[in-house]
Amino acid sequence: MAEKGARAELLPLVRQKYIETGNLTLAAETYGVSRQTADAWKKYEGDEWDKARERKSTFGLRMEALLERELTYAEARLAGAVEGSTLDNLSKLGALVVKFKTIEAQGGATYDRPKVFLENLQWLINWVKENDPEGLTVLARNIDAICLAYKMECLNGNA
């Protein structure tokens, strides 16, 4: 069982596990918290846990709708009137939509946040290396802080 007074540390972890699995008992057991305690934490925050779970489950659909809206807007503009950065963003969003559809087609494999974080970090390093070699020094100097910030976001359920 979890130590008394560990709420600040354990609540975000239990919350995130519930959001990912929808199973409050599993979330509680994973972190050594009683089911009653986890239920009390969930009730205290109202329906926020369930809202976060809903947002997570509809994320792919929302991204697809966003892509459709932005593509419709871009297509309505005159030829050559869409900036390159907008086209680049649409391309990236399209790639994410395809990635999520592929995951869904494979039976809804779980989203591997650390893997995606590392992939994005590798992309960032390569981009900075090519476009701003001096920035690579700054990135190297701050990489620990960046990774720590990411871990904190995960603990708080924001990543």
Image: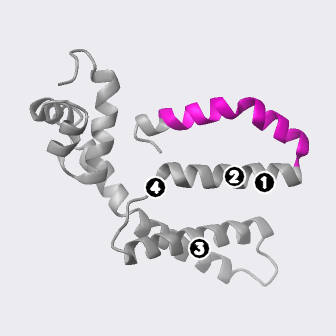
Give the residue type at disc 4: Asp
Marks 4 and 1, how far apart in space? 21 Å
Mark 2 and mark 4 lie on one chain; the one further toward the N terminus is: 4
Answer with left or right where residue 104 lies relative to residue 150. left
Check disc 3 and report the residue beneath it: 94
Q: In the rendered image, which residue does mark 1 sit on? A: 126
Marked residue nearer the N-terminal end (4 or 1)? 4
Magenta stretch encompasses residue 77: no
Question: Quick one: 33 or 66, which is closer to the camera?
Answer: 33
Q: Are marks 2 and 1 in contact (CB under 8 Å)?
A: yes
Q: CA distance from mark 4 to mark 3?
A: 19 Å
Q: Amino acid at mark 3?
A: Gly
- Residue 136 vertical position relative to residue 10 in the rendered view, above or below: below
Task: Measure the alpha-carbon separation of dots 2 and 4.
Answer: 16 Å
Q: Which residue is mark 4?
A: 112
Judged from the image, the secondary structure of the residue bearing numbered disc 1 is: helix
Residue 138 part of the magenta-drawn span: yes
Please, what is the three-letter code of the amino acid marked with disc 2?
A: Gln
Counting the numbered discs, the total is 4
* Disc 2, SS: helix
- Apparent side of residue 81 relative to residue 14 in the rendered image (left or right): right
